[in-house]
Amino acid sequence: MVVVFVLRFSSEDVSSQNQVKASVQRKIRQSIAEEYPGLEPVLDDLLPKKAPLIVVKCQNHLNLVVVNSVPLFFNIRDGPYMPTLRLLHQYPNIMKKLQVDRGAIKFVLAGANIMCPGLTSPGGALDDEVDAETPVAIMAEGKQHALAIGFTKMSAKDIKAINKGIGVDNMHYLNDGLWKMERLD
């Protein structure tokens, strides 16, 4: 399961850190710009063209995009780049959002995947525009900031229609290893 990779992440899991050449940096910037058009006005500040962009390869196919020792984005294998929660809290409107009900919060914060009923019950909320295999911010009923970043296993419409099983893989959540790693020196 992809989820286990990020959840148990710690600095000991780092395999290599490499400054990427300009062509790779451009490709990463372009991929992030396409996935998160809301970041366009601040992309040059987040990923300055002159600052070295480091790709940190970790165990279990986890890659971190690091600028000035700060992890900003991550991906698994060659999947889409997803912002860290710290970055998402700075720019809360860059991702589509799904909301879990109060009963799901403690499970999500313990690393559990997001089950369909937690999104469809009163207190949960779905964005019908969300397709399968889409990075999403997981919001919580009554809370202002995202508590997790997920990757949808099915579309929002299917989550509503099927209403059982895992709807979203929990990729990164508050207080996990990636959250605790504010800097990578």
Image (cartoon, helix red, strand yellow):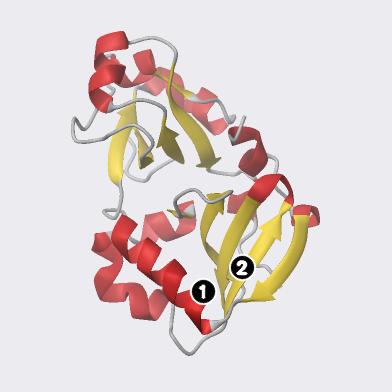
Give left or right: position of 179 versus 133.
right
Residue occupying the point 52% across, 41% down: 173
Rendered location of residue 137, percent (x, y): 36, 42
Q: Which mark is residue 24?
A: 1
Q: Give the quarter of the image for residue 64.
A: bottom right
* Residue shown at the point (55%, 25%) measured from the top left: 112
Do tag 1 and tag 2 residues touch (Cβ < 8 Å)? yes
Task: Farthest residue to the left: give it.
Answer: 128
Tag 2 residue: 55
Figure check: 107 above or below 183: above
Examine the rendered structure and indicate whether residue 63 appears above or below residue 148.
Answer: below
Q: Quadrant of the N terminus?
A: top right
Which quadrant of the figure has residue 118?
top left
Three-letter amino acid code of the residue under disc 1: Val
Report x, y in % for residue 163.
33, 10
Q: Position of residue 108 (x, y in %)?
A: 50, 29
Query: Sequence-wise, which precedes: disc 1 or disc 2?
Result: 1
* SS class, disc 1: helix
